Image: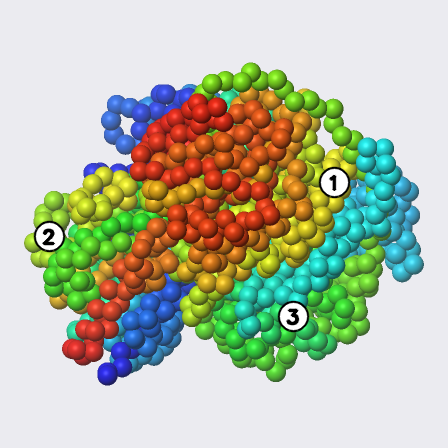
Amino acid sequence: MKKVKAIVLRAAGINCDMETEDALELAGAEAERVHINRIIEDKKLLDQCQILVFPGGFSYGDDVAAGKILANQIVHHLHEPVQKFIDDGKLVLGICNGFQVLIKTGILPGNGQSGGQDTVTITDNDSNKFEDRWVYLAPQTEKCIFIEAGRQIYLPIAHAEGKIVTKDEAALESLKSEGHVAFKYVDENGEEGPYPINPNGSVDSIAGLTDTTGRILGLMPHPERHVRPTQHPHWTRLKDKTDGDGMTIFNNAVKYVQENL
Amino acid sequence: MKQWRFEVFNRSGFSDVHGNSVLEEIKELGIGSVEAVQSAKVFLIDSDFDDNFAQRIGKELLSDPVCEEYYIGRSGPPAGLAKATLIEVHLKSGVTDPVAESVTAALADMGMKAGNVRTARKYVLLGGLNQSHTDTIAKKILANDVIETVIIGSEAEPPSPHLKPYELQIVHWPIRDLDDDGLTALSKEKDLFLNLVEMQAIQKYYRQLDREPTDVELESLAQTWSEHCVHKTLKSSVDMSINGKEIHFDNLLKDTIFKATKQLNKSWCISVFVDNAGVVEFDKDTAVCFKVETHNRPSALDPYGGAATGIGGVIRDPMGTGLGARPIANTDIFCFGPPDKKLEDIPKGVLHPRRIMKGVVAGVRDYGNRMGIPTVNGAIYFDDRYLGNPLVYCGNIGIMDKNKCFKNPQVGNIIIVVGGKTGRDGIHGATFSSGEITHEYEATFSHAVQIGNPITEKKMLDVLIQANEANLYEAITDCGAGGLSSAVGEMGQDIGVEVDLEKVPLKYGGLNYNEIWISEAQERMVIAVKPENAEAIQKIFDDENVESTVIGRFTGDKKLILRYDGQQVAEMDMDFLHDGVPKYSRKAVWNKPELTEPSIAEKDNYNDELLQILSSYNVASKEWVIRQYDHEVQGNSVVKPLTGVKNDGPSDAAVIRPKFDSDRGLAISCGMNPMYGDIDPYWMALAGIDEAIRNLICVGGRADRIALLDNFSWANCTKPETFGALVRASQACHDGSIAFEAPFISGKDSLNNEFSCEDGTQISIPSTLLISAISIVDDVNKCVTMDAKRATNLLFVVGETKNELGGSHYYKINGQLGANVPKADLQTAPKIAQKISTAIEEGLIISCHDCSEGGLAVALAEMAFAGGLGIEADLRGLPKSKDCTRVDSQLFSESNSRYIVEVEPENYDDFAKMMLNVPFGQIGKVTAEQTLTIKAEDGKKVIELDLDSLKKAWQKPLDW
């Protein structure tokens, strides 16, 4: 079978790179953690892989705003190779801080379309504090290749700046109508609701966004933290111990690359 | 160069969460006249860019295009009728400003070189405010005097911190001709915290050398000999009188805690009490190390910064153990004054406990989370006596190759300092933390507060791991208390070192050689490298923008030589520096206090008491704290701090699975109960050990692989009674360690935790021993948690309930202390632990919870509401001592070594067989009702409460 190669981007303050690499490898990819300085030095590194992951953490301390400094670095040093990577039909996944970076570079929601970074942003949680808690996520699209349509999944969030807001009502409407909404926060029964069901106050309970091609996904929850049954917060109560829900995202990515790239 | 000023505000329509939370805190202070608070970020950038570029920076870098707007220059008060007060908070000069560093780097990414960059926070308070309210808000909410300057109104920015470059001037502090008063005065004047005997020893040394010491030599001695670094009290010889009987210890530590470890001689103990952390075997290739430190004094002055550097510092301990471990978990245990204490009851010079707690939690959160290390275990205790001396214990566990557990610096190795730059922060931290706090300390010791930057530490960790994997260095240690002085001094102890201090990279100019040597600036490590590896290792550091500088070498002459610009500023014998500290003999006394049991009338029903205990701060849910810590980063969590059907029940211990390719796990717990120490510190210490071990056992930890850590936080130990309490506790550590065959592998003490109020009254902390524990879990898939699992399952209590309400929460809510402190039975306790552990391993137990504060009733309530299932219990089945006849003592006694276990009916026989020879009895069963009922021996219901009210009572007090 085709070898699937993934790069997990490292930078100062990124701290979910090891478990993200592990999740990709569990899904059958060959994953490597690469520091951003190496890619700036040798932009061809991106040519050798099909999946680029921006993992979680606190890139550059989240100084100024979460993901902002790393986004600035990517815009000014890696704009072309990243754009080529996307144009080549490859996959980009941003988790938590990585999602914030994708938003703040403008790669999501529109990658230049849909108004880009001027209409959607991620800001401080309504609670004004960092929170680590588990949330249910309902998929909102069938065309995002990372997502198993119709399957609700259970993942942890761990962030202080995860509230998605749009510039105005119209911007929210176009996010929805253009199919950018990837996941919503819901309760166990699939219903939207207030805090803590929606843990940060995101507009319309949005937890993750995708681009118009469905090959870029950014989400606040951490799929790489639910890849084994014993990571479920009350696994000791469950009779069936299956793989963690987060594996669906990594498995789908690897499968897509094998079948399409 | 032009200075540009940018202000960044929230756009209208987007909530200003920082401003709103400040408003909330202002209201909590009782100031009602403020109607709204607007917050803004301020950036001051010295650079020659033009207006166009300034607009770009404002738009693209500093503000968010959706929810923020920027203003170039100084914005005035907003238009409108309300009176506005402008307050700006700037960092004091020399305080690290990480955001400014990031902005500088980002500007460079945009192609623009900036000079000085600074950041500040601006608050616009709308509503009528008098001067004193404004000052109160500024001081109590917005700024910390120690590190920040407040500017009220529209005044100018504080001056830019341009310091004069330093010109070498070698300073001597003459000592040879001083009399005793002169020696004492010198020690006091220079904040050396050396006592007369120590000063005399130093005087003698310099008389022999026939010269006067330099400032840096005396400072080195003060750091190396500080209580914080050398633990002279615990290593002193002791004449102890216990209830009139005399005993003698040549060296308290060696004769108690070390002795037990030595006697147990476990083959899985790899390195104990010698390195920065204790090291034990994890599996055949891997070891884990564990260290717990206190950061009490700095956290009293600056809760946020003190706690942040507390966790930052202890993370560097495993990083500096052996050849360096990778941190995999943090633990945090705090002691505070009651958070509902009235403002007017707070002594001068002390921050309100609620502010301390919020600051400490935020400090640990921000540092630990940014480091990407899960904070998995902890506890919080509240007592009036922690008002002036809050205690902040921070722990860290690291994982390392088994063949890299020892350092080996050699003659000819070069010394490289890696990581952060050196500044004036944290000077005298080690000596400061060895003294008593007074109401004036804030002013005197503000420089002792270190300023942390977790991203600098994370970057350093990332490259050190690579350098370790490439085998490019011979030894590593961290710069903690005492800074380079301790780090280089210790590493070169047996060899000798020479250091050129002008090479040390500085945050800003103007530091003299002495400040460079003793600064406790954070995020620095020191490594010993073979000259031929220098280039390769520095490339690894350069590749990820981590600073590294060669500052000296290992010489082989067993001397400490310091130079500045080629001129020698210190020359000392390592032997004197490290072994010259005089040995102490101390007196200790412990007399059993005259205490009696209270008489409390028996009642027919104890619902109110149970709810009240669940609502007491020590027992209440700590979810508000736990959720702010990232306890799942690294993807290693198996048993999380919160568990149960709604993920909100209190786990007994944490379990992590540190290797991606193995199901082997590590259980982590703690035990502590200062209240028992008010009755007898011996039984307090044993209770702490028993509790920490119970917690490990409850989640599936092995009983034969337990390692312990001790952290003593005590009051002034020159008082024989206070020291006597410490000796009692040390004896218990020995006895408990031997009985459970659980060696101590590391420990630390923080003494002199006393506060002198302005009126001369003294507040001494209660004797507070924290026991931390780790054990191995062979297969994490077999772990269990404390939440009740399924209706119809059977509940058993293993271990005997005795009439032991002394120091209990039940007595506390009745305003009593009592006398019958829980006394661990060292014959039975290890047997029970072993049997429970085996039963879990064999799958016979599906839930397990220990009885601790609040006793049986609290433990049953917690199991029920965590599982969302009812419990019917009957005290007839409770294994109890003959004197445990009263219902209240059966419900609330805090006897040690007791476990409540849930067993499926089909496993009843196997379980019962396994529990032969230890006290156990069936206490009831799990039900589908949403109620906890407990029947007394006469069949009457003494507790009947629905789960909702139980859970609410437990969750409400700290649900902030």
Image color mode: rainbow
State if disc 1 and disc 3 touch (CB < 8 Å).
no
Q: Secondary structure at mark 3?
A: loop
Name the front one of labels 3 and 1: 1
- Kind of residue at disc 2: Lys
Residue that protrudes farthest toward the top in the picture: B601
Q: CA separation, marks 2 and 1?
A: 68 Å
Comes first in the chain, label 3 or label 1 = 3
| Res B494 quadrant in image | bottom right
- The residue labelled by disc 1 is B728
Q: Residues within 10 Å of mark 3 (few under 14, many from 20)?
A: some
- The residue labelled by disc 2 is A176
Q: Are marks 3 and 1 on the same chain?
A: yes
Q: Position of residue A39 (x, y in %)?
A: 34, 74
Q: In which chain is the residue bearing label 3?
A: B
Residue situated in front as seen by the camera: B158 or B293? B293
Q: CA separation, marks 3 and 1?
A: 33 Å
Q: Are marks 2 and 1 on the same chain?
A: no
Name the front one of labels 2 and 3: 3
- The residue labelled by disc 3 is B406
Q: Position of residue B341 (x, y in %)?
A: 51, 25
| Residue appearing at x 67%, y 47% in the figure | B827
Name the front one of labels 2 and 1: 1
Residue situated in front as seen by the camera: B166 or B366? B366
Q: Position of residue B264 (x, y in %)?
A: 71, 59
- Kind of residue at disc 3: Phe
Q: In which chain is the residue bearing label 2?
A: A
| Residue appearing at x 37%, y 72% in the figure | A33
Q: In which chain is the residue bearing label 1?
A: B
